[in-house]
Each structure stands twice: as C-alpha cells, then as structure tokens.
Amino acid sequence: KQEVTQIPAALSVPEGENLVLNCSFTDSAIYNLQWFRQDPGKGLTSLLLIQSSQREQTSGRLNASLDKSSGRSTLYIAASQPGDSATYLCAGVSRGGSEKLVFGKGTKLTVNP
Amino acid sequence: SAVISQKPSRDICQRGTSLTIQCQVDSQVTMMFWYRQQPGQSLTLIATANQGSEATYESGFVIDKFPISRPNLTFSTLTVSNMSPEDSSIYLCSVAGTRGQYFGPGTRLTVL
C-alpha cells in the first residue's frame, strides 16, 4: 500500500528565503507526481505535475523534482513571499493505477513579512 | 484546465440526516473522484465515479454510506448518509486532465 510522508509538517521562514519541502513514497513505482497548494478552508490548487517521463518541472519561483529510484520528491520555492503561506501537499499516482492520487499530510508553510 | 464547482460550499447538519453534494465540471470527463479530508488530515479517496457504471469504492467506504450518482459526463453527486459527527470533513471532487488532477473548492460539512 502506497504511503506518502511529507517533511517538515510545518515550516516558518522570513520573507525572501529559499526553501525546500520534501515528500517520500513507500512504493517508488510512481507514475505521476503532483504538488498542490491548499489555503485554509479552501480546495486544492495544482502547482506542478511531473509525468512519468519527466524528472522535474518549473513554474515561476517553483521547481519540483522527482527521483523515482528513491521515491522522493522535493518542491523548491525561491524568494518566498507572505502570499506563499499555505499548506503544500504532494500526491502520487502509482504505476498501473487508475489515476488514484495518494496524498501526504502536507507541509504548512508560513512566510513572515 | 477544468473548472469545477461544488454545492453547497458548506453546511451544518444534524446527526442522522443525509446531505447530497453536487459537483459540476465545465467539460466532459470520463472519471470523477470524490475525496474526504478530515480535520487535520490529508485527502483520502472515497470512490471513483465513471459515467454509465457503478462507482468504485475504496477500502473502508461503502455505497450505503456514500451513494454516488454520475448521470452524465459533467456532473456527479455524493450523498453522505445517516451522518454522525465523525463525518465532519471537507468533501472534494476532482477530475483527471492532461495536466494532472483538478479539484473543486470543496464542501465543508459539520455534523452536530
């Protein structure tokens, strides 16, 4: 059974800092990996998708990478801003699965002005 | 990307009653998913709903408790039946697209 662990559970940083969020899977047979952002009381906003043939994706100040051999992914946020404060969730689709996403518990990020 | 809406956005219900949550997508999709997010927890898949067939439920979720309808390619409903306080959660629907999965805004349910 696929399980996803996100470290740290919470992170507080000053504005402008670069930071890394970590995600690991018990089953490294990941087909797709997706990072989401969730604001309090809201739904999920998709940030980045790393598909089976890819190793990383970039969007603006965000960069996500996936190491399938180790079952680990990182989300790098450059020059953090207070508006980045949210919970960040990673989720994976196992190879041969039915698009079912297995989620981690998330990292709650606070960027202080 | 798909635009997904859900109704209601939130509700407060009494124990023993049922609530039906609606999910509307702005494009036709084959698969729709229903997730639950309990307080302080991550998302857990309840079931996968394909148009024209019975929903497929994950371990720990049963049709009698969470009946799902999928009458067409843009719409689905999830009913939370015979509710108890343990059902207090955010319920989210999602669809699979070319750039991953897209989620609705969620329905925040509180059961008293």
Image (cartoon, coloured by chain):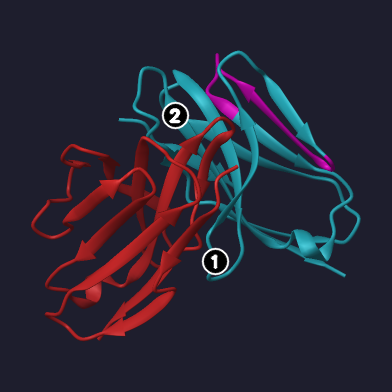
Chain colours: A cyan, B red
Q: Which residues are magenta?
A: A60-72
Task: Give the quadrant of residue B54.
Answer: top left
- Name the residue: 18% across, 37% down: B53
Query: Residue A42's mark?
Result: 1
Judged left or right of residue A23, residue A4 is left
For the C terminus of chain A, the image quarter is bottom right
Query: Element at badge 2?
Result: strand
Residue B65 percent coordinates (x, y): 13, 60
- Name the residue: 8% across, 57% down: B64
Q: Provide the residue designation for mark 2.
A: A93
Q: Are marks 1 and 2 on the same chain?
A: yes
Residue A74 percent coordinates (x, y): 67, 34
- Name the residue: 41% across, 18% down: A95
Q: Amino acid at mark 1?
A: Lys
Tell me if residue A19 comes above or below residue B87 in the rendering. Answer: above
- The answer to which of marks 1 and 2 sits earlier in the sequence is 1
Query: Element at badge 1?
Result: loop
Judged left or right of residue B42, residue B54 is left
Give the chain of mark 1: A
Tell me if residue A92 comes above or below residue B47 in the rendering. Answer: above
Front residue of A16 and A83: A83
Front residue of A47 and B29: B29
